[in-house]
Image (spheres, helix red, strand yellow):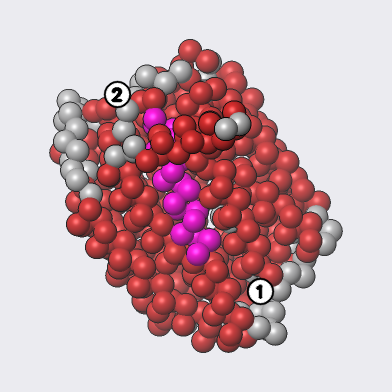
């Protein structure tokens, strides 16, 4: 057998030996993303094409939804540390998101869409930090990057399947139409409830509680109770995220450059295919060469992609860059979460993941609102055009890379 074959076989054995909790949580994320990706990327098109909403309001809807989740991520993470238990916070969050989804069928204006997104993201806010801490608690340090990489791969594989289902429904219902039709959107909403409910069932039956050491800090403990290297990393992530507006703007950019609805969904399938294939190897790579190097590569790639999106002249330019965008996600998402676990003790992981996910979501509100204003302005001000949000994002990503190298020295970046 060739050296490459031997290495592949070795890595596959490592994957097979991952604990039950990692596999069940990966399955739940897979099913949830099947559900979410059927509709989440169509929500900005529903707002723009069906309800006639401007980009500033679309940015507000997406930003407020993520901010809601963020505030709860901080609280749920602290609570899970204080309780020393993670499972039922995780299950309840998935259940709330599932219950909220069907109400999108009734939404006939942007405040109604905002209300549904508020409650759906509330569920995400409750579940995310305890879930991430549960993964970290269930796995040994030397396999942490692999476990988070597998989880992200399952997440993106579910997204790919959900988008493939959306592609099929759109093709059957409105294959020759550029704009999204309301009946198509409503059909996809109802279909999305099925895998979401299965995810809740899988978690309820399959996940085993890992009793963590209870935090000595009170449930109301703040950011200052966490280690200094983590706090510095959080500030860097916050800067990066201020330029990382909702991916809804990528969808709008593709449509603005002339890509059809079917073309957009097909591109998102390819994006998630890239994400799925690279996430596991990228996580394993971070176990070997360090989180900081892999994360730096991901953020530099993001800056180049956003620069390209700002300068894109045709729909094909946007399509190619969106597929490459999956590589950025694969390098960055799981690696950043593994890095958080490296920087804090087990008893504070829930709190740390709450602050990490919370900071990302809180920054999403100003990031998305600013992106919408830069694109179309407000009132009589027309904004700077569709290229502006992407150029802004590229600049902040480069600044974040510089701070990561300066504020997060290699000795802090070593796994603990």
Q: Earlier in the sequence, mark 2 or mark 1?
A: 1
Q: What residue is rendered at 38% in x and 61% in y?
A: 31
Distance from disc 2 to disc 1, alpha carbons, whole Å, reads 46 Å
Of 98 and 197, which appears nearest the observer? 197
Q: Is residue 145 magenta?
A: yes
The answer to whether 399 appears left or right of 360 in the picture is right
Residue 274 percent coordinates (x, y): 60, 50
Q: What residue is rendered at 34% in x and 38% in y?
A: 18
Work out which residue is located at the far front of the displayed protein and give it: 1
Q: Residues within 10 Å of mark 1 (few under 14, many from 20)?
A: many
Q: Are marks 2 and 1 in contact (CB under 8 Å)?
A: no
SS label for mark 2: loop
Image label count:
2
The answer to whether 249 appears left or right of 67 in the picture is right
Of 14 and 110, which appears nearest the observer? 14
Q: What residue is rendered at 62% in x and 85% in y?
A: 174
Q: Residues within 10 Å of mark 2 (few under 14, many from 20)?
A: some
SS label for mark 1: helix
Tag on residue 261? 1
The answer to whether 142 appears left or right of 99 in the picture is right
Q: Quadrant of the N terminus?
A: top right
Q: What residue is rendered at 72% in x and 52% in y?
A: 321
Residue 378 percent coordinates (x, y): 66, 63
The answer to whether 117 appears left or right of 385 in the picture is left
Q: Tell me where residue 407 sits by quadrant.
A: top right
Q: Is residue 415 magenta?
A: no
The region drawn magenta spans 143-161
Up-down: is 24 above or below 399?
A: below
Q: Which residue is mark 2?
A: 345
Residue 122 percent coordinates (x, y): 33, 58
Q: Tell me where residue 32 sits by quadrant.
A: bottom left
Tag on residue 74? none
């Amino acid at each position: 057998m060739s050296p490459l074959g031997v290495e592949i076989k070795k890595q596959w054995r490592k994957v097979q030996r991952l604990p039950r909790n990692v596999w069940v949580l990966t399955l739940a994320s897979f099913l949830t993303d099947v559900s979410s990706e059927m509709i989440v990327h169509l929500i900005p098109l529903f707002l723009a094409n069906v309800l006639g909403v401007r980009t500033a309001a679309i940015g507000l809807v997406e930003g407020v939804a993520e901010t809601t989740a963020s505030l709860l991520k901080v609280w749920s993470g602290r609570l899970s540390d204080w309780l020393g238990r993670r499972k039922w916070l995780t299950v309840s969050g998935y259940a709330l998101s599932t219950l909220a989804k069907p109400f999108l069928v009734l939404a006939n204006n942007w405040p109604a869409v905002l209300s549904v997104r508020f409650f759906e993201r509330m569920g995400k806010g409750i579940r995310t930090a305890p879930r991430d801490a549960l993964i970290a608690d269930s796995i040994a340090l030397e396999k942490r990057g692999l476990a988070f990489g597998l989880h992200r791969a399952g997440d993106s594989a579910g997204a790919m399947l959900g988008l493939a289902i959306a592609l099929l429904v759109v093709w059957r219902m409105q294959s020759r139409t550029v704009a999204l039709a309301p009946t198509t959107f409503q059909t996809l909403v109802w279909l999305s409830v099925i895998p979401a409910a299965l995810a809740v069932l899988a978690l309820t039956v399959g996940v085993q509680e890992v009793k963590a050491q209870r935090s000595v800090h009170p449930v109301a403990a703040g950011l200052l109770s966490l280690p200094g290297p983590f706090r510095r990393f959080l500030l860097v992530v916050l800067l990066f995220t201020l330029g990382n507006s909702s991916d809804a703007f990528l969808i709008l950019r593709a449509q603005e450059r002339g890509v059809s609805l079917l073309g957009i969904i097909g591109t998102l399938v390819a994006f998630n295919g890239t994400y799925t294939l690279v996430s596991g190897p990228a996580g394993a790579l971070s176990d070997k060469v360090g989180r900081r190097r892999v994360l730096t590569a991901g953020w530099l790639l993001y800056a180049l992609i956003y620069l390209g999106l700002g300068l894109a002249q045709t729909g094909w330019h946007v399509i190619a860059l969106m597929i490459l965008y999956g590589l950025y996600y694969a390098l960055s998402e799981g690696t950043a979460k593994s890095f958080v676990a490296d920087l804090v003790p087990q008893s504070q992981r829930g709190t740390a993941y709450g602050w990490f996910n919370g900071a990302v979501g809180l920054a999403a509100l100003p990031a998305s609102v600013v992106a919408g204003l830069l694109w179309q302005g407000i009132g009589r001000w027309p904004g700077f055009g569709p290229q502006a949000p992407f150029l802004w994002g590229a600049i902040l990503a480069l600044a974040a890379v510089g701070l990561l190298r300066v504020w997060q020295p290699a000795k802090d970046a070593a796994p603990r």
